[in-house]
Amino acid sequence: MGYRVAVVGATGNVGREMLAILAEREFPMDEVAAIASSRSQGTQVELGDTGKMLKCRNIEHFDFSGWDIALFSAGSDPAKDYAPKAAAAGCVVIDNSSLYRMDPDVPLIVPEVNPDAIDGYKKKNIIANPNCSTAQLVVALKPLHDAAKIKRCVVSTYQSVSGAGKAGMDELFEQSRAIFVGDPVEPSKFTKQIAFNVIPHIDVFMDDGSTKEEWKMVVETKKILDPKVKVSATCVRVPVFVGHSESINLEFENEISAKEAQDILREAPGCMLVDKREDGGYVTPVECAGDSATFISRVREDPTVDNGLVLWCVSDNLRKGAALNAVQIAELLGRRHLQKG
């Protein structure tokens, strides 16, 4: 017997990816529902490569009673309105928005990193999916933290426009086209021109000068990995369609060499080490798109601090950073608690 699964926000980039990954990983489902806003009611979405089309239902009229799991990827406002209703109806919500991530009664889960934390989901019947840039970061950090205990992490991100949704991808495409043909370029989704440019600004600014995206990385990493780790983040939007990249500088309590780190990462769950010290011996966003792994390259020692390492980390933000991680949480939930299929 399988699960009854609802995908909320099924017409968006991440919602469509959730449907594709559910099919790809053969998640045990007796029934799947595509849920969207009233304006998308009746829109057809595909269940991955199965050839099966799903007609979107209006979330305003959807009854979550009798459904086992709801994968939410519709943003904070719908999550605020409908996630508690779904949870109260007995449907476990796995939410991709930022709304519940720092709620102490809601587990924030990356299955390779803190699977045991899922046991607290019953407090609200809601589980939070982390920020896309945080998810790949902690997958890379966890095995190294276990080995030598990270004291401090300084991370700079190079985040693709798909992190801003379809509108972000459309803006990069349209601006690139406009520049080639000599048309004027007007920013809309982003604060400045994104084509052939980089923008050191994601989400709103906070009082201390950091952006909310940077704040998310700090507090989420602490909640998922270890509250004692000091984290500093600079988040940058780059003209890449899919795939987030990160330059990570680590300081450890205990001694660890680059060779030891490579050996650890080569065997770590969710990680794929591609680290040849030659032309092309590393992974870029173009190569990671469509893949489930968190790729790690350029592992080297930092001589400016005791027990320091530097590494490069790349992952498909629509997959591990969002849809894949949500499905992995559902799989973990099934193994530990729901036990169907």
Image (cartoon, rainbow, N blue to C red):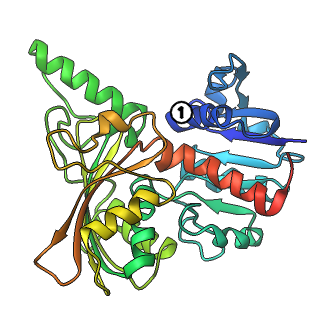
For mark 1, what is the residue?
12
Q: Is residue 111 left or right of residue 160?
A: right
Q: Is residue 89 left or right of residue 279?
A: right
Residue 301: percent from the left, percent from the top?
18, 70
Residue at 60% in and 38% down: 18
**Screen quadrant of the C terminus:** top right
Residue 306: percent from the left, percent from the top?
18, 84
Name the amino acid, label 1. Gly
Residue 274 in view of the camera = yes
Residue 49: percent from the left, percent from the top?
63, 21
Residue 106 in view of the camera = no
Residues packed near mark 1 inside 10 Å, few (<14), some (14 to 19) or many (20 plus): some
When asked about the image quadrant of residue 172, the answer is: top left
Residue at 41% in and 76% down: 145
Instruction: Tell how many labels.
Output: 1
Residue at 23% in and 48% down: 276
When asked about the image quadrant of residue 222, the answer is: bottom left
Seen from the viewer's position, the closer of residues 205 and 164 is 164
Is 163 above or below relative to 36? below
Residue 321: percent from the left, percent from the top?
46, 49
Seen from the viewer's position, the closer of residues 303 and 105 is 303
**Screen quadrant of the N terminus:** top right
Q: Secondary structure at mark 1?
A: loop
Seen from the viewer's position, the closer of residues 29 and 236 is 29
Residue at 10% in and 78% down: 304
